[in-house]
Each structure stands twice: as structure tokens, then as C-alpha cells.
Amino acid sequence: MRAHLIIRGRVQKAGYRDYIDEVAFDLDLKGYVKNLPDRSVEVICEGEREKIERFIDKIRIRQYPISVEGIEVDYSDATGEFRDFEIIREEDLTEAVYERMDAAARYMREMNRNLAEKIDAGREENKQGFSMLAEKMDSIKDDTSAIRTSLSSLDDLRIKYEELRRDMAEIKQALREKGIV
């Protein structure tokens, strides 16, 4: 089976042809992908119909900076003219290099945005963690204060017990001296 695809949307200068190449490789499809002057992308691929349909599903993506708006598909019989899948790049090397640099800049902006989001999320997690830590420290402080109060009460009881013991010893001594005990 052979499929001729015209893909429209934000599909040029976005690394989309590389993505298509990876998917085609994974599905063992043969053919090519290339940019067209109208900013669309053309794909010719040959392979089993089921694999071609999976290929079309996998390349229909909206993942920044790629945004596929539509895919036109025409099926025909395979010709067997392709040995593998390839990316046909622009003849003008300067234009190709600039395209790569534009795509790299977009990727870096996206990575920067993602990193900033992760940092913000980490800050929020830290803020929550520190808040919980502060609550636990307050609880420990309260527990420590309660223990100190208990220890102080125990110390008071020990002093009173010692006073009672001395008083009892004096009473016993006085009773012995009087011959009562």
C-alpha cells in the first residue's frame, strides 16, 4: 500500500519532519517527507495499510511547536521504489541551517517555560513543606512546654514528698521518745 499525504498547520520549522522520520522508522515504512513551498509537508510512504493508518494517527499531533491542522490522504498501490524512509531537505543549505536554528530557539523557549513552571511548582511545594514544618515545630514546642510543666509538677511533688517523709520521721521519733511506739 502507498499513501500520499499533505499535512497542513504549523508543520514547518518545528522539527516535524524529524518526528515523522522517527515514527516511519518505528513502523518500518518506506518513503520520504519534505517541506512544500506553501508551508505544508508532503509524505509519501509505503507499507502495510494497518501500519500506514497507525502512522497517520501518530503524526496527527498538537505538541508545541508542532500543530497539525489537517492531513489529506490519497491511497494507491505501492511501487516499491523506496528502500528506506528519508527526509528530503531544502537544497539551499543556508535556509536549512536557519530553519534548524529557528526550531532550536523554539525548543529552548519551550524548555525554558517548562523549567520555569517546574521551579514555580517546586517553590510552592517548598512553601507548603515549610508551612507544615512550622506547624510541627509549634506542636513540638507545645509538647516540650507541657513536658516542662509536668516535670516542674513532679519536682514540686518530690519536694513535698521529702517534706512529708521528714515530718513523718520526726513524728515517729517523737512518738518513740514518748514511748508510744
Image (cartoon, grey):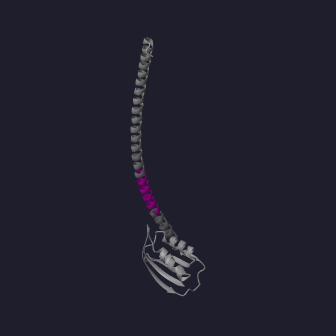
Q: Where residue 57 appears, x then y in whole percent?
A: 48, 76
Q: Is residue 118 covered in magenta?
A: yes
Please name whichever residue, 178 or 50, is drawn nearer the observer in this view of the structure. 178
The reply to whether residue 18 is visible in this rendering is yes
Which residue is painted at 54% across and 79% down in the image? Answer: 51
Please name whichever residue, 30 or 61, is drawn nearer the observer in this view of the structure. 61
Q: Where residue 7 appears, x then y in whole percent?
A: 45, 77
- Which quadrant is home to the C terminus? top left
- Is residue 22 shown above or below 135? below
- Is residue 163 shown above or below 114? above
Q: Is residue 133 covered in magenta?
A: no
- Which quadrant is home to the N terminus? bottom right
Dominant SS in magenta: helix
Which residue is painted at 41% across and 19% down in the image? Answer: 167
- How many marks the image carries: the answer is 0
Residue furthest to the right: 83
The reply to whether residue 92 is visible in this rendering is no
Please name whichever residue, 5 or 41, is drawn nearer the observer in this view of the structure. 5
Which residue is painted at 52% across and 80% down in the image? Answer: 52
Specify the segment rendered in magenta. Answer: 107-123
Residue furthest to the bottom: 77
